Image: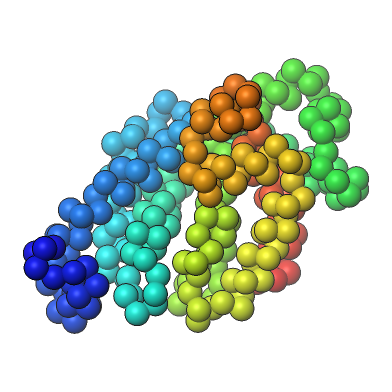
Amino acid sequence: MGKSKNEEELWRLYKKNKDPEIRDFFVKQYAPLVKYVAGKVAIGMPNNVEFDDLVGFGVFGLFDAIEKFNPDKHVKFKTYAVTRIRGSIFDELRSIDWVPRSVRQKTREVEETIRKLEASLGRAATDEEIAKEMRIDIRDFQNIMLKISGTSVLSLNEVWYTGEDNDRISIVESIESPSALNPDTIVEKEEIKRVIIEAINELPDKEKKVLVLYYYEDLTLKEIGEVLKVTESRISQLHTKAIMRLRAKLSNVKRGIL
């Protein structure tokens, strides 16, 4: 089938007649994409999260992407599907509540401390300042960050609804694929994107580099460690801190612009 018609024609055909044979062709064609996205999500996850489960969750996202994809929007299916697959994986992870309560509580505590400190300082707070504000030793703070780091990737995929037909944008989408934005809601999304990019630009240099290399250049945490000449666990902590700072910065703004 793929050889006789180009993919664009197949999409138009599928939109007209919902032929199950064409759908199966797309599922087979893009199955490796599900494994790729699941692999990215699996990095740094705790051992109780199985890779095969992530792939299973992602397949639902692929089906959803095939059903909702509009070839007239001038967005590549691959770009569109990646966000749907990832969204589906994180929706499932949320629903099974895989993050231990103690870790979630500590995450909130650190995030709130960062939010208050950086609002009063007007700049990024250092590890020492955060630890002092939390009244804990710097080593204890670093241990907390290690525990949190396995769950932090979930935070960056928190979605912001833009109001129209439940259209949504995640923080990671605005770093990763600005071209995937839907022109129908471009004004709201551009504003969200502007705020997010501004917040990213205010991050300490190393944290900003980690986000860009991980989400835009598509490197693994290990590869980023090699680029920045630090250990993978240090990169994982920088990644976590970057996300927590972002969420802290955006928590007040979010309510105001949507």
Q: Which residue shows up at 42% across the image and 57% down it?
A: 83
Residue 119 locus on image (x, y percent): 86, 50
Side of 110 relative to 214 (left or right): right
Q: Which residue shows up at 67% across the image and 59% down it?
A: 196
Quarter of the rendering occupied by the N terminus: bottom left
Residue 100 locus on image (x, y percent): 53, 33
Pick the front one: 214 or 144: 214
Q: Can the viewer see residue 55 in this picture?
A: yes
| Colour convention of the picture | rainbow
Pick the front one: 8 or 245: 8
User: What count of labels does the image hold?
Assistant: 0
Q: Which residue shows up at 74% across the image and 41% down it?
A: 205
Q: 52 above or below 27?
A: above
Quarter of the rendering occupied by the C terminus: bottom right
Q: 226 above or below 190?
A: above
Task: Find residue 127 and report its image quarter.
Answer: top right
Q: 82 above or below 54?
A: below
Pick the front one: 91 or 80: 80
Side of 166 relative to 55 (left or right): right
Residue 98 locus on image (x, y percent): 46, 37
Q: Can the viewer see residue 100 in this picture?
A: no
Q: 70 above or below 132?
A: below
Residue 128 locus on image (x, y percent): 83, 27
Task: Find residue 55 and report its image quarter.
Answer: top left
Task: Find residue 107 and report its image quarter.
Answer: top right
Q: Which residue shows up at 40% across the image and 60% down it?
A: 79
